[in-house]
Image (tube, rainbow, N blue to C red):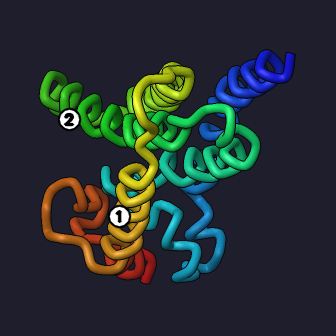
Amino acid sequence: MAVLLERRFLKQSELAGVPFIILMGSLLHFTYEMSGMNPAVALISAVNESVWEHLKLPFFPALILAAIQYARLRKLYPNFLYGKAVGVFSMPVIIVVGFYAYKAVFHSSNLAYDIGLFMASVAAGQLISYKLVLKHGGKPVNILPIIALTLAVVLFFLFTFNPPHLEIFKDPLTGGYGVESRIRYTV
């Protein structure tokens, strides 16, 4: 009976996670500016309109949801960390692939497509996570997901303030990179 209740909790929290991540991610699009450009808020919020900064929008809310779920589900699902990590990482990957694919076809970006892509990436990531968490196979792999998620957080933090000068990091509105492009744009 307890196993069924926990499975129900997993399913409901993964489903509820879709609107949670979408809502929180949407808020993170604006929190940096609303905070008066607070550097601490910049770490998890989009600081400009680059593709890279938009990858924070699903990543950090999904990571928060995973931490909440982990507290309750870690003992029942030995592959929880693996499943959640793959789900969390799939969201930014889907956004990058989808964005550059539709941009290659249509030769421009489109806000409606961007929003739809964001929402689809969240739903797909939650589904992937759910399916993988339920899989019980072999010895659980827990250290690798922790290392990968930690590295991703470090890269998001680092590249907010010191991004490489690559297309994915370039703000299409200002032509700048990272937090500096936003400061120059508003001054």
- The answer to which of 101 and 44 lies nearer the viewer is 44
Residue 21 % position (x, y)? 62, 40
Describe residue 177's horizontal placement relative to residue 53 as left or right.
left
Q: Amino acid at mark 2?
A: Tyr
Q: Which residue is mark 1?
A: 151
Q: Residue at x 58, y 81 (%)?
A: 38
Q: Which residue is mark 2?
A: 100
Among the 4 quarters of the image, the one containing residue 171? bottom left
Q: Nearer the viewer, residue 180 or 78?
A: 78
Callout 2 secondary element: helix
Q: Please report the residue visible at 61 percent of the width from the left and 37 percent of the height from the top.
A: 22
When asked about the image quadrant of residue 151, the answer is bottom left
Q: Is residue 129 above or below residue 5?
A: below
Left or right for 170, reference 31: left
Please, what is the three-letter code of the amino acid marked with disc 1?
A: Leu
Q: SS class of the residue under badge 1?
A: helix
Nearer the N terminus, badge 1 or badge 2? 2
Where does residue 159 sit, x and y in percent of width and height?
A: 31, 71
